[in-house]
Image (cartoon, helix red, strand yellow):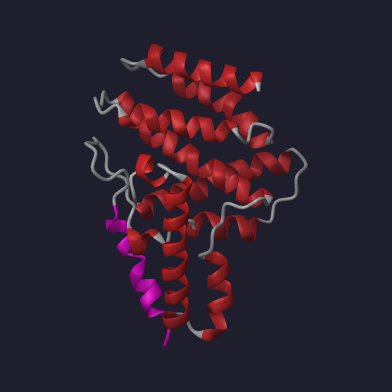
Amino acid sequence: MGMNQFLQSLSDLETINRAPGYFKFEQHSVAAHSFKVAEEAQFLGDVEEQAGNAVNWRLLYEKALNHDYTERFIGDIKTPVKYATPELRHMLADVEDSLTANFIHNEIPKQFQAAYTRRLGEGKDATLEGQILSVADKVDLLYESFGEIQKGNPEPVYTEIYRESLTTILKFQNMACVQYFLKEVLPELLSADFSDRQKLQSMTHDLLQHAEEK
C-alpha cells in the first residue's frame, strides 16, 4: 500500500463541479476552489500576522488545501440543501468522516496516517487558522456568486449564495482580516460596473448595518 490512490484521486477533484444543478456562465471545480481558498487564506493570514497575531502557516496551508478533499466521496452538495437543517448537516458530516477514516485506514501507509487524519479532518475549528479557513472559504464563494451576478446570470440562487457568504463572513467581523476585507476589498468589488450593482450594493449595506447593530 503506497500513496498512489491518494495522488490519483486528486484528479477526481477536477471533475467535481461546484454549485451543481444551476445554470452558470463559468464552471468551478473543487480542485480550483481548493487552490483559490489556499491563496485567499494566505492573504488573510498575512493581514492577521501584520495585526500582531501568530499564524501557524503549516496548519493554515494544510487546512486550506485539504478542506474539501472529502467531496471526492460525496460530491459538492448544493449549498441550500447542505445547510437546510442542522440535522442534515450533521448527517452529511458523519458520512464524510466515516468515508474519510475508511480511506485513510485502507489507502494511506501507516507512517502517514496520523498526518492525513489531521489534514483531511474538519478544518473549520476555533483556532485562528480554522477561522481564517472559514472566512477564506466564504470569500471564494462570494466571488464565485458575484461573478455570475456580474455576468447577468438570471438564477436567483447566486444572490442568495452571495447573501449567505457575506452573512457568514460577518460572523467573524472581529478578526483583523475580515475588517480589512470589508473596508478595503469589498467596496472595490462592488464598484465594478454591472447591471445589478445598485441592488447588490443595497443588500450589502443592509447586511453590514445589521451586523453592526448586533
Q: Quadrant of the C terminus?
A: top right
Residue 2, by quadrant, is bottom left
Q: Quadrant of the N terminus?
A: bottom left
Q: Position of residue 198 (x, y in %)?
A: 40, 11
Span colored in magenta:
1-16
Tally of numbered tags: 0
Answer left or right for 42 relative to 90.
right
In this view, the residue farthest toward the bottom is 1
Q: Position of residue 30 (x, y in %)?
A: 36, 53
Q: Residue at x 44, y 34 (%)?
A: 142
Q: Main secondary structure of the magenta part?
A: helix
Report if residue 146 is visible in the image.
Answer: no
142 in magenta: no
Answer left or right for 103 relative to 126.
left
Q: Residue at x 60, y 55 (%)?
A: 60
In this view, the residue farthest toward the right is 52
Q: Is residue 103 above or below residue 140?
A: below
Residue 151, by quadrant, is top left
